[in-house]
Amino acid sequence: MNSHPKLAAALLVCCSAVLEACAEDPAPAAPEDPAPAAPERRRVGGFSTPESVLHDEERDVYLVSNIVGSPVDKDDSAFISRVSPDGEVLDLKWIDGASEGVTLSAPKGMAIAGGKLYVADIDAIRVFDAGDGAPIASIEVPGASLLNDIAALPDGSLVVSDSGVTIADGAITPTGTDALVAIDPGGEVSRLVADPALPHPNGVARAEGEIWVAYLGAARVDARGASGEQRRELSLPAGTLDGIVRLDDGRLLVSSWDASAIFEVDPGGDGAPRVSTLAADLPSPADLGWDRARSRLLVPLFNDGEVVLLDME
């Protein structure tokens, strides 16, 4: 980030070390396949601590959340950008926390449902009109420490990760609020899973009847059922995981700060899962987006102020 680069990096890179002593022993790592052909990549710059990218399919535009300052400070200085699929920044500060009537301090994961844009912002979900960016509401999540990513479910409800950390006196501090938070279409908040032993949930992605979760504090992803129960655990070659997207064929794409890479994971059904490195040399890869129409992965580089467009076909 521009004003606190070391602080931002510490939040995401050091979480796994903080709770290493209390983390569960990982399952055996899935075998790593040879790397596939590297996808074509393009870089779009000019952002300020980009944390998440979302493809708005209806309007065919990419939305980028910019934290600007500290990822835990309620400074109302953040913004959301609009970018064309050609890489043109259409509106750098489309939604601006500095504007009257807009509250936006440290936006992270985003989702669109029912014509509304939902944005995770520390301990609340900010709701905007997905068409014009006008503010609609804020959904407070009492007791949350660091709301991080959002997955929209078919019924219009949301699942949000709480990574369960904050920054106090310049140090990463676990808060014990690690959770998956459920928000129904009416805005009612509940905890789907709440467990201090969770290794800092970060990325979330929807699948048929399941939620996939990637963790900051462990080199693993989990599949969880609609009620939050754990169904499957897959270990990855490196940790400090951030974004996760699920493709239509069931494969997962997961970003790892430790590896500066994107992993491609084939869960394998009843067989053994397979893992390969889809793209390397991507420092501080944060919350991923997916452009289904173009088979394009959208990778925000948190500390570099860039978004990388990776064409997989």
Image (spheres, rainbow, N blue to C red):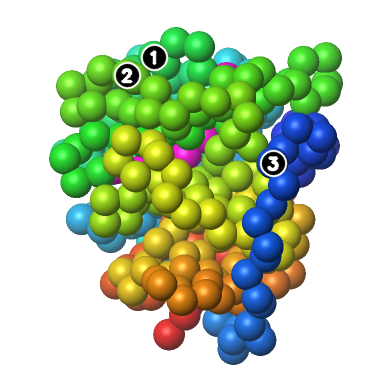
Q: Nearer the viewer, mark 2 or mark 1?
A: 2
- Give the percent coordinates (x, y) of residue 68: 62, 33
Where residue 293 sits, quadrant-wise, is bottom left
Please report the residue visible at 44 percent of the width from the left and 10 percent of the height from the top.
Answer: 142
Q: Is residue 303 above or below residue 281?
A: above
What residue did someone put label 2 on? 189
Q: Is residue 89 visible?
A: no
Q: Nearer the viewer, mark 2 or mark 3?
A: 3
Amino acid type, residue under disc 2 in the picture: Val
Judged from the image, the secondary structure of the residue bearing numbered disc 2 is strand
Sequence-earlier tag: 2 or 1: 1
Where residue 43 sits, quadrant-wise, is bottom right
What residue did someone put label 1 on? 140
- Give the percent coordinates (x, y) of residue 302: 66, 48
The residue lying furthest to the top in this view is: 142
Please report the residue visible at 56 percent of the width from the left and 38 percent of the height from the top.
Answer: 201
Amino acid type, residue under disc 1 in the picture: Glu
The answer for how far apart the CA atoms under marks 2 and 3 are is 28 Å
- Which class describes the residues within 10 Å of circle 3: few (<14), some (14-19), or many (20+)? few
Q: Nearer the viewer, residue 120 or 104?
A: 120
Sequence-earlier tag: 3 or 1: 3
Amino acid type, residue under disc 3 in the picture: Glu
Sequence-earlier tag: 2 or 3: 3
Point out the stretch of residues depicted in magenta.
Answer: 145-152
Judged from the image, the secondary structure of the residue bearing numbered disc 1 is strand
Please report the residue visible at 52 percent of the width from the left and 75 percent of the height from the top.
Answer: 272
Q: Is residue 98 above or below residue 8?
A: above
What residue did someone put label 3 on? 24
